[in-house]
Image (cartoon, grey):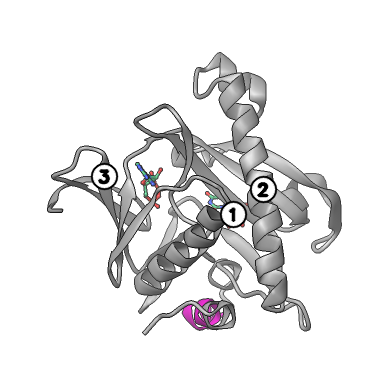
Amino acid sequence: MEKRSELYRGKAKTVFTTDDPELLILQFRNDTSAFDGERIDQLDRKGMVNNKFNHFIMGKLEEAGIATQLEALLADDEALVKKLEMIPVECVVRNRAAGSIVRRLGVEEGLVLNPPTFEFFLKNDALHDPMVNDFHIISFGWATQAQINEMKVLTFKVNNVLSALFDAAGLILVDYKLEFGVDANGNIVLGDEFTPDGCRLWDKATNQKMDKDRFRQGLGGVVEAYEEVASRLGVQLA
Ligand code: ADP
Ligand code: UDP
């Protein structure tokens, strides 16, 4: 497998083509962005930690029968993945209120959401990733009703698997964002990443934030918190 040209440079990852048209390389960079890319810092080791974290989590999801992009870990900061036609929406599940739902609905941070709630956001930095609903997604042709249904089922299935995994590590999975794409056979497959950059994790005992909110809120110890989560899960970083 040969790395070819740069296909896309996002805020945190760079995507490269390979000699296999169905495979891509995701390079996880140290860049850490917040507020739709308005603030970007370099955090030492973050690319490596997130790449290995993502590989570990996607492996657990595969074991649970969820189709993911996962192919192989190539280097500290690079993974080989299935090339997907990405659906331009973010699927968010919230087990507790935090972040934008607190601002939008004026509820208290930490409020337990029973049942967990689901939101779609359009991936569009210039528009600040506006919330969209199923009708928008269908009217604008971003996905079909069947694909929407499947993304919801899969996103909640991920919640069952990962809430239990993090709970066993003494962590609360507060919320998270997933991105899906369509593979060469037309199947919906989990793409992008699952890392502390795209979810909220609170320590069960202390409620300490162990995710990107440390960066958003200037709390410091960002990568150290990610490493602590990785270590509790048994992710091999060295
Ligand atoms: P952003 O685009 O939000 O700045 P990233 O820096 O994480 O995000 O860039 C990664 C890009 O690669 C995203 O646009 C994402 O949708 C896309 N991507 C992730 N996984 C895959 C995949 N398996 N196939 C094709 N594109 C992917
Ligand atoms: N999220 C993400 N990328 C985005 C927006 C949100 O990974 O572009 C994640 C975020 O880390 C959190 C969840 O999705 O775990 C819900 O985010 P929220 O809507 O609360 O937005 P935020 O407070 O991050 O603006």
Is residue 226 rendered magenta in the image?
Answer: yes
Q: Which residues are magenta?
A: 220-227
Q: Provide the major secondary structure of the magenta segment.
A: helix
Residue 185 x, y percent position in the rendering: 38, 28
Asked if one can make out residue 173 in the rendered structure from this viewpoint, the answer is: no
> Is 165 or 85 nearer to us in this picture?
165
Q: CA distance from mark 2 to mark 3?
A: 25 Å
Circle 1 residue: 64
Amino acid type at mark 3: Leu
Within 10 Å of disc 2 (Cα), the crowding (few <14, some 14-19, many 20+) is some
Among the two numbered marks 3 and 1 on one chain, the one whose residue lies closer to the N terminus: 3
Name above or below for residue 57 compared with residue 220. above
Circle 3 residue: 23
**Which quarter of the figure has residue 175?**
bottom right
Amino acid type at mark 2: Lys
Residue 87 x, y percent position in the rendering: 46, 32
Among the two numbered marks 2 and 3 on one chain, the one whose residue lies closer to the N terminus: 3
Circle 2 residue: 157
Question: What residue is drawn where x is 77% and y is 44%?
Answer: 117
Residue 216 x, y percent position in the rendering: 56, 66
Residue 24 x, y percent position in the rendering: 26, 47
Within 10 Å of disc 1 (Cα), the crowding (few <14, some 14-19, many 20+) is few
Q: CA distance from mark 1 to mark 2?
A: 9 Å
Tag 1 near tag 2, CB within 8 Å: yes
Question: What residue is drawn where x is 64% and y is 64%?
Answer: 200
Amino acid type at mark 1: Ala
For the image shown, how many numbered marks are present on the structure?
3
**Position of residue 233 in the picture relative to residue 117 (left or right):** left
